[in-house]
Amino acid sequence: MNDLISKTAEEIFGIKADPSDVEKLRAHITGKYGGENPENIKKAFMSGEAAGFLTVNETYFFREPVHFDFLLNLLPAFEKTGLRICSAATSTGCEAYSIVMLLEAYNKGRALPLPYHIDAFDIDQLAIKTAVEGIYGERSMREDGSSLRYMTLPYVKRLECGYQVDSSLKKNINFFVYNLMDALSPESYHIIFFRNAFIYLSHRARSRILSNLSCALKEGGILIMGVSETAGVGHESLDEKNEGDLFYFQKTSLVSIPHSPFPIP
């Protein structure tokens, strides 16, 4: 990887940049800054522009439903303590909103609702802007989320060319721009969703980011990754768990995980 833009993408974002995306960013840098040189490349990365060219914002509501079924099974263990969740590399926020919809469905009609908070971040500032606005295109609803799509009905309004989430979903979500190559606050979360981003990372960055995520988990915390990504994960502080078709990682075994389905009230 001799190209300076590609090298910078790995050093700053930890990603293996797609060559076609690198060329688009190169054209942008040349057009906006008058030429491709180390100083102008740095400007594009430091301003946040580069992330929009080099990241893949492929997301939709209730993607990989098995993870949301699993989350539902975990909720009873946190009714007294409350729950802190991280949606890392959240893209435009469909994952974070899906989590909230599930939690709100769980809390509906309960005398003592389960308290929760979600931090949702991404390195792409335009993706986070979309998440904050909560307005999405047609592809935010897919067949691979159809088994839980009914949960969107009270909260997602149909637009002429897409969807808009209800503003009430935002009260427990903190959306912000953040780079996972930087350390997170230690022991901040009970559960971290980090799905379908690992495959874009360089080998060197994978170890660093897994360490950052592990550090951010509380004792017994759960890391949930994309269904197709778990085979490449290896970290001394994360134990791989398997329940049928479900794979996840646990920082320790101190938290008891319910195994029986827990129906929505």
Image (cartoon, rainbow, N blue to C red):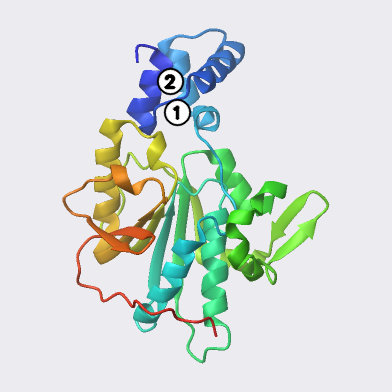
Residue that appears at 55% across and 40% down: 57
> Residue 27, labelled with which disc?
none
**Res 166 quadrant in image:** bottom right
Query: Position of 240 compared to 112: left or right?
Result: left
Is the N terminus in the top left, top right, bottom left or bottom right quadrant? top left
Count of numbered badges drawn on the protein: 2
Q: Which residue is mark 2?
A: 42
Instruction: Tell me how far mark 1 sits from mark 2, CA to CA.
Output: 6 Å
The residue positioned farthest toward the right in the image shown: 160
Q: Is residue 242 above or below residue 182?
A: below
For residue 38, above or below residue 199: above
Measuring from the top left, give residue 142's x and y in whole percent.
64, 53
Residue linked to disc 1: 46
Among all residues in the image, which is located at the extreme bottom?
111
Snapshot quadrant of residue 240: bottom left
In the image, 50 versus 197, the foreground residue is 197
Q: Position of residue 107 (x, y in %)?
A: 53, 81
Dot 1: element:
helix
Query: At numbered mark 2, what does the secondary structure look like: helix, strand or loop?
Result: helix
Residue pictured at 43% horizontal, 42% vertical: 197
Q: Quadrant of the C terminus?
A: bottom right
Q: Is residue 7 above or below residue 153?
A: above
